[in-house]
């Protein structure tokens, strides 16, 4: 059976890569689905990249690591938490295990009788996503050390720094 | 660069399989994206299966053929044709070629400067989709000959005949 | 625990009343929820009356029968069958039993582990709804015999015949 | 105060022009608002042209007639008839008179206390819209005689015949 | 005629109960409709409970007080203030009086010619809702004193404290 | 060809007027389209006025200046930035030039190959919009000096101060 890891991957960074490596190492025969959350959101301070671009980052990063047997599925927001698990089940290939450290995600999937496992590294990266976006916006050198090299050069090709600057600061930043 | 083939795959049948084989044979190094159209539609006479179930059919049929290098992406409807290509571009990994015999799909993608190629077999299958759903609803033996064996057994496991019967006849059928 | 009866009640007619009487007689201590389906639809040939007006019909008809212990809840459409049960559960007070003869409703609720019971009379009324709307549109005398007297006078107060005529014929009629 | 004429103008034809001429002649000092209905619909058999293109047709046709003092406002569908008048009021500059022969439009605006006037010619054109679209699809010569010359040449520049053919026949046609 | 009291009831607390008692005492023969606002919102810091659960709280609290003759109707958000009164009118059984201290609610209903009455206690409770949610999240003993006993035990059965903690802090808190 | 200036015009003030004057002076033969953004938003602290009312302000202000040859089109939000340009193109009469100082608007239109020009004054007014709304809410005399006199008297007729006060303070204010 498959495992499911939901994230926004804005951008896909070393924290995400570490989690994927960890899962794939633990369960090498279990295909992993990466659910690309808030898929229809893009060109905003918190969601700068399209689902299409986020797929590209994942494909390059996992390809460079020779990780196979994964698939990525865009998951648009539904804005109704009580229906979210049914929404995911409808769009994503069948899965039986969910990897998350987000307490709400855990609550909702457990209510629907899924096995939920923590990914110790994953929670920390949440903040990493925001700080990498801040570094990108300022074109501070630190962002390059926090994403896989293949993602760094892809972000260059997108002129990510320029794009992030065009949004202004995020409301909470 | 990738090619894109959009269909609803309700269900994935031998016509679809022939088209995929044809494309993969012609361009063995070009990854193929199968866009699962009307992704959020399910449990209706014309769209009986969820995107999740349709992914399963594709994976089983292409796996049995040892076809690799494809990926499948759910594409929800947007109900605004003028915005549809931008919607697809946002969700689907970058592609440069579109395979279709649908004249509207051709019109919209050509307007957005994509190379569009006809798939001579593909148009005919359109009707095949409807007739296979009718045969399924009636549990007429013919439906088994029109889908790959792996899809047939998957449809059995879904109790597809029973499901289709529960919708009543489609409005136009 | 409560029972749930979902209908569109366009309008509430003698068939509906018979079903409610039957359920209330069978299980006098179990509160009955009437889910008013397609709640946000109104002023169309198939859904001529608002949820507010349909509530009024139910209240008058059940009041005249001295039936108490029911409640009525508007349920807007969600247009995604796979999510419909979760949608109903979110809006409607908790229930454990579903009354329906509609095969799709049965399929969806059974998949979510509800007890589903047939209401032998209920299926037939489906067509009755359409035929009463047709009679109303034509102001044919027959419609009065098919709805409770309190509903008939309420429909008069709404000038229902005039309203239905203003829509033209339904697409399938 | 302004008058309001709502139509879909798919395309803007001689029937529409006659109505506008009639209104402008009757009330030369009262600005006329043309509400472009189903504004977000395009590239379908019944709504082939975008609101932007329909604006262009109106501007060319009324410009050729030296009719001034009008304005055109796109009105997206809201799919809830009970809310439609409030929706129109929010988007359209204030108006006090409504021109329509559509019974439902009349019902809804009268309920909201607007003065509603019939436009004797307008009802007939409804069918004209459908028949002009059919003629356009078949590239039958008749369509040119039913639209203003400036609209005919604009439709040529859009390659309207080709576009309509790409949709296939409308479901009801 | 009925009165209407709109609230979110997240959760239903003693301030709400006082208002209902006050209204029922003043107008014992006038049925009271409780409109459950933001009905489709749940599992968020500001809207932790589903409409279904909020109905349950109301039913238990008013049942314990032997208050009858009320009904509760879920009202989903519409996100367009100009259309909100029409939206409420479509879903809620007819009413002629509105109880509110919210100035916007007052403005919108007065514009639509409703009699609006202030409920002196009601405004204060607005902040009470937020502070009770904060107390719940921290499992501080104070929350129990601010809701009816029947609501407190219902919230225990929902493991409300745990649920609220799973969302993190609200953005503004 | 036309030029396009997108703004929310909440309210239309002297900064907007200066920009329009500047454009019309520079290109007197090029019609100017004012796109009324967030058209469906109204009765909120940041979007207090309906598109209909904002049209009225524009018409009065430009009429007082004897500026003709403009038109105004409501543009509802679409909440998907990647699709926004296609959305605007569908609703607005064809244009070839875009006036903006907003970096995201520039990015999106440049990506779609439009000529984009800065309007040096326009950026500053962004804050002016917020500060005029704040002054209006407080009924501080300063607001009258920042809008054209015809807009000031129109705002009086709307009892704008009272309306703004009814919303409470904006979340960020």
Image (tube, coloured by chain):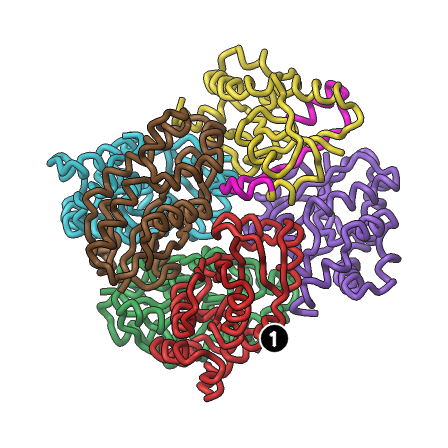
Chain colours: A brown, B red, C green, D purple, E cyan, F yellow
Is disc 1 placed on a helix, strand or loop? helix
Residue at the (36%, 32%) spot, across then down: A144
Chain where mark 1 sits: B
**Screen quadrant of the C terminus of chain D:** bottom right
Q: Is residue D72 left or right of residue F130?
A: right
Where's residue A44, x and y in %? 45, 35
**Screen quadrant of the N terminus of chain D:** top right
Disc 1 designates what residue? B124
Any part of residue F89 in sight: yes
Q: In the figure, B135 relative to D155: above or below? A: below
Where's residue A40, x and y in %? 45, 46
Closer to us: C141 or E163 = E163
Where's residue B51, x and y in %? 42, 63
| Magenta stretch in the rendered image | F57-85
Residue D47 lies in what quarter of the image?
bottom right
Residue C97 lies in what quarter of the image?
bottom left
Closer to us: C16 or E131 = E131
């Amino acid at each position: 059976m498959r495992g499911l890891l939901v994230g926004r991957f804005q951008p896909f960074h070393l924290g995400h890569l570490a989690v994927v490596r960890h899962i794939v190492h633990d369960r090498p025969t279990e295909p992993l689905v990466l659910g690309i959350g808030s898929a229809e959101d893009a060109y905003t301070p918190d969601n700068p990249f399209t689902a299409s671009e986020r797929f590209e980052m994942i494909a390059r990063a996992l390809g460079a690591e020779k990780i196979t047997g994964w698939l990525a599925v865009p998951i648009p927001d539904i804005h109704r938490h009580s229906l979210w698990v049914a929404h995911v089940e409808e769009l994503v290939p069948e899965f039986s295990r969910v990897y998350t450290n987000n307490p709400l995600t855990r609550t909702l999937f457990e209510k629907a009788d899924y096995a939920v496992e923590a990914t110790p590294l994953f929670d920390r990266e949440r903040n990493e996503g925001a700080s990498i976006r801040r570094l990108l916006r300022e074109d501070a050198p630190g962002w390059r050390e926090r994403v896989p090299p293949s993602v760094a050069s892809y972000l260059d090709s997108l002129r990510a720094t320029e794009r992030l600057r065009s949004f202004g600061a995020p409301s909470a930043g």
